[in-house]
Image (cartoon, rainbow, N blue to C red):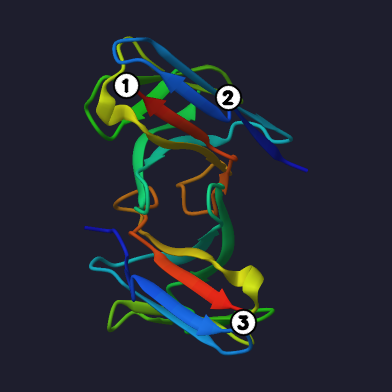
Amino acid sequence: SQQGEEDPQALSIQEGENATMNCSYKTSINNLQWYRQNSGRGLVHLILIRSNEREKHSGRLRVTLDTSKKSSSLLITASRAADTASYFCAPYSTSGSRLTFGEGTQLTVNP
Amino acid sequence: SQTIHQWPATLVQPVGSPLSLECTVEGTSNPNLYWYRQAAGRGLQLLFYSVGIGQISSEVPQNLSASRPQDRQFILSSKKLLLSDSGFYLCAWSATGHGSYEQYFGPGTRLTVT
């Protein structure tokens, strides 16, 4: 399956700490995308990393991709209460021609 | 800039009643369009996607259907709702292509079938 699987399912940290979420997938990909969903809202695209990239940064976000291990990680540095949300990875491959989302990681940042 | 609208925001419908959810996109042409459903605390299930007017691909066989009567309008329908149709319905669009671009989501419709 092209679907990504996020780990852990839930993560609770204190404000100011770093949060790391992992994603594993099973097929070859063209890119992998991370999304955030606040409770009761639509998903928001955070970052896209292509299969030929190993690391990408966007503000307090750092994404890594290891295609040999078929895994990716999302690091949020200096977390804030406003980062509380569910985070989803979505691998994309041309053979599948669409994104598929995992169950997500529920991140809670305590003030 | 592009904007995606969904309505209604919430809906409570009895079992056996019809359904029509609408999604419209502004500020872009010929987008790929998607309907997802999300159960509480779960991931997204792709229901339908469309690469053009009248072109609908179904991912999950069930009592739901989708239509794309205009370039930037995507409608999700049912003739008779089931209890299992309850959930959070999300519409999304992406730029024309192979779907590899980022997707932009609407605010969602919370459907409760009673």
As helix, strand or loop, the secondary structure at mark 1 comes to strand
Outermost residue on the right side: it is: B1
Tell whether label 2 touches label 1 (CB within 8 Å). no
- The answer to which quarter of the image holds residue B7 is top right
- Mark 3: amino acid: Ser
As helix, strand or loop, the secondary structure at mark 3 comes to loop
Q: In the drawing, what numbered circle is on residue B8?
A: 2
Q: Quadrant of the C terminus of chain A?
A: bottom right
- Percent across and percent down for residue A92 are 39, 59
Name the foreground residue: A27 vs B21: B21
Q: In the drawing, what numbered circle is on residue B93?
A: none
**Chain letter of the residue beneath label 2 in the structure image:** B
- The answer to which quarter of the image holds residue A72 is bottom left
Task: Please tell me if label 1 and label 2 are on a single chain.
Answer: yes
As helix, strand or loop, the secondary structure at mark 2 comes to loop
Q: Nearer the viewer, mark 1 or mark 3?
A: 3
- The answer to which quarter of the image holds residue A10 is bottom left
Tell whether label 3 touches label 1 (CB within 8 Å). no
Rendered view: A28 above or below A99 = below
Q: Which badge, 1 or 2, comes first in the chain's sequence?
A: 2
Label 1 CA crowd tier, 10 Å (few <14, some 14–19, many 20+): some
Name the foreground residue: A70 vs A46: A46
Residue with the mark numbered 3: A79
Residue with the mark numbered 1: B64
Q: CA distance from mark 1 to mark 2?
A: 17 Å
- Mark 1: amino acid: Leu
**Chain letter of the residue beneath label 3 in the structure image:** A
| Left-right relation of B30 to A68 | right
Task: Please tell me which residue is depicted at 43% across the width and 29% down the height of the picture.
Answer: B111
Task: Please tell me if label 2 and label 3 are on a single chain.
Answer: no
Q: Nearer the viewer, mark 1 or mark 2?
A: 2
Task: Please tell me which residue is depicted at 29% across the width and 59% down the height of the picture.
Answer: A3
